[in-house]
Amino acid sequence: MGLKAVQFLGIVGLAWAMGAHAAEPPVTVPEGTFEHAVLLDRDVQTEWIKSFRVDPHPVSRADYAGFVQAHPGWRRSALTGLFQDGGYLKHWHSDLEPDGEPGEPVVHVSWYAARAYCEARGGALPTLAQWEYLVNLRRRLNGHSDQDYANAVFAWYGEQRVATLEDKALGLSGFIGPVNEWLEDYQLLLGNGDQVDFGGGSCGDTGRLIVRYDSAHYATLLRYQMRSNLSPETTASNQGFRCVYP
């Protein structure tokens, strides 16, 4: 291991020990009402979301390097197939040396690994309701139209790397690019791995569960369906995460 790598690991290890979190503190999200765009439970159309704190950005590669340095059981060479699909941190130069830029979102992490990271930081993965509430709150506070939102979602999943919707109100990045993000209860959308628990799985079947038939609701449905392709062991090149805190 070269001198630069040793210096890098010393810095991230110190940051982890001191509790530094991506160089920016979590953002406090105000409480409010969340209206479900996709009805997973027809008896629950609105929820009251309590105030919580959330990482302003997806967890970075440098942050995750600090985690695996402090928790050897989650290093690439130590993690068994029970908790990953064989692609865990596969592009890292070694157990402790990430690929890419240190500030880029960490990817190729399973749900198990993301969950362990957040628990080690005294947090948790966002619930589906918290995450979707934040997506809607950002849209409202920043004055993004339904069409702006739909265009951004369709462009992202169409692999057109257009500029993401800027958040001047809360200072949060992500949510629609640069990565998809793990949720604590994403399996509410699953039967078993790739068997969708959406009353059949086709667009026609799942379309019955959206509240309104417009471009914004179809864009949201697309995001829900993409989650349904995941299993807890999934490690993908576009799958990252962030944490929430009480």
Image (tube, rainbow, N blue to C red):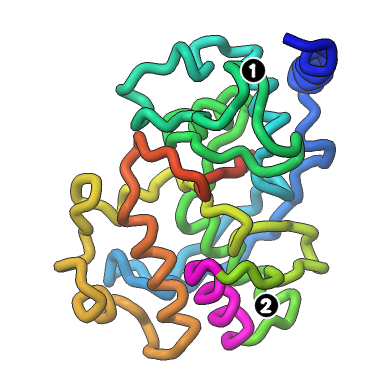
- The residue under the point 33% across, 71% down is 39
Q: Is residue 18 visible?
A: no
Q: In which quadrant of the rendered view does residue 234 lie?
A: top left
In the rendered image, which residue does mark 1 sit on?
A: 96
Query: Vertical placement of 93 versus 186: above or below?
Result: above
Task: Give whichever of 89, 70 is nearer the camera.
Answer: 89
- The residue under the point 53% across, 16% down is 75
Q: Secondary structure at mark 1?
A: loop
Q: Nearer the viewer, mark 1 or mark 2?
A: 1
Task: Give whichever of 124, 222 is nearer the camera.
Answer: 222
- The residue under the point 58% across, 85% down is 146
Q: Main secondary structure of the magenta part?
A: helix
Looking at the image, the residue that sits furthest to the left is 200
x, y (%) of residue 62? 72, 30
Q: Is residue 79 visible?
A: yes
Q: Secondary structure at mark 2?
A: helix
- The residue under the point 55% across, 44% down is 240
User: Quick one: label 1 or label 2, which is nearer the N terminus?
Assistant: 1
Q: In which quadrant of the rendered view does residue 245 lie?
A: top right
- Asked if residue 149 is among those painted magenta in the image, a careful observer would answer yes
Q: How many marks?
A: 2
- Near mark 1 (Cα within 10 A), the count class, few <14, some 14-19 or many ≥20, is many
Query: The magenta stretch spans which residues?
Result: 146-159
| Amino acid type, residue under disc 2 in the picture | Arg
x, y (%) of residue 120? 59, 23
Q: CA distance from mark 1 to mark 2?
A: 40 Å
In the rendered image, which residue does mark 2 sit on?
A: 140
- Asked if residue 158 is among those painted magenta in the image, a careful observer would answer yes
| Amino acid type, residue under disc 1 in the picture | Leu
